Image: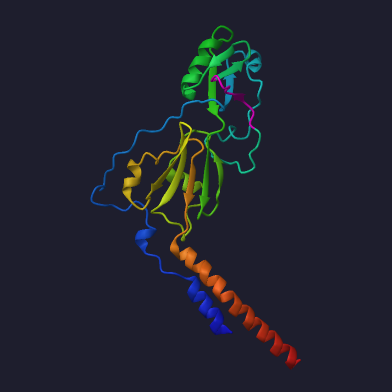
Amino acid sequence: MAAVFLGALVTMVGCVSSTKIVYFQSDMENGANVRMPEIYVPLIKAGDVLSVQVSSLNLEASTFFNPYAPISQTTPRTQQPTNTAGLPEMAGYMVSGTGEIELPLIGLLKVEKLTVSQTSALIKEKLAAYLKEPTVNVRNLNFRISVLGEVMRPSLFTIPNEQITLIEALSLAGDATIYGRRDNILVVREENGQKTFARVDITKRSLFRSPYYYLHPNDIVYVEPGQARVNNADHFYQIVPAILSALSLVAIIISRTY
């Protein structure tokens, strides 16, 4: 019986080379310094939901321009990514198919293909006719990424500050498990109505030059299982019948003894 369990333990443990799990290894092309890609700044598009918070010297007047109460994703921990697996309803201004949002008194405002900073400046300019020294804070509430596969906590995450790297996304998911392939991570991205499938090797420093280092809204990060995971799964199903047979034999012996 002990031999069966010892055999099961041995088969469940595989040898994994450190070169397959150590991050940011140097190579001939990437030494101590690596040129980074430009920081990705997302542009507002149709279907986005924007949170617009307005303040000014006149608190009562400012309230009129804040019909939506602040939601948990944006206050008070504005820089903390949120696990949104439950997909809570978002309170904000939906960008229409024509790329517009409608604000109190201001009316329709074209915001498509603008950054949130540009949108804040535009709204502030429009509010100058109604408020004294207005301050505007705009956030895109549906900047989301999905992390799946061989990670500790696969989930869908909302990114309040609208900037996240592939490494940060893996950190949110608790990092890849020992069985995850770090040299062949898949990033699925939708651009211009098409899905793009790219492979990224985070064991090499070339990761920092990849156009997929900075993630985009609705990106999917998938860590596929390595061969060790597949082998362990096969071994498990191979030894289960042996373990069950051994347990049945022990039960029969005990029943006859007593």
Quadrant of residue 90 within the rendered picture: top right
Where residue 12 appears, as percent x and y from the top left, is 50, 71
Residue interval drawn in magenta: 90-99
The quarter of the rendered structure image containing the C terminus is bottom right
Q: Nearer the viewer, residue 170 or 70?
A: 170
Q: Which residue is pictured at 55% across the width and 74% down the height?
A: 238
> How many numbered marks does the figure carry?
0
Secondary structure that dominates the magenta span: loop
Residue 176 on the magenta segment: no
Q: Is residue 91 left or right of residue 149?
A: right
Q: Which residue is pictured at 59% across the width and 80% down the height?
A: 242
Question: In the current view of this chain or complex, which residue is farthest to the left?
Answer: 28
Residue 91 on the magenta segment: yes
Q: Nearer the viewer, residue 54 or 214?
A: 214
Where residue 110 appears, as percent x and y from the top left, is 52, 16
Where residue 198 appears, as percent x and y from the top left, is 41, 44
Q: Which residue is pictured at 58% across the width and 10% down the height?
A: 131
223, above or below 126, in the image = below
Q: Nearer the viewer, residue 187 or 124?
A: 187
Question: In the current view of this chain or complex, which residue is farthest to the bottom?
Answer: 257
The quarter of the rendered structure image containing the N terminus is bottom right
Q: Which residue is pictured at 34% across the width and 60% down the height?
A: 19
Question: In the current view of this chain or complex, which residue is farthest to the top?
Answer: 129
Question: In the current view of this chain or complex, which residue is farthest to the right?
Answer: 258
Q: Is residue 210 left or right of residue 250?
A: left
Q: How is the image coloured?
A: rainbow
33, above or below 257, in the image = above
Q: Is residue 13 left or right of residue 50?
A: left
73, above or below 198, in the image = above
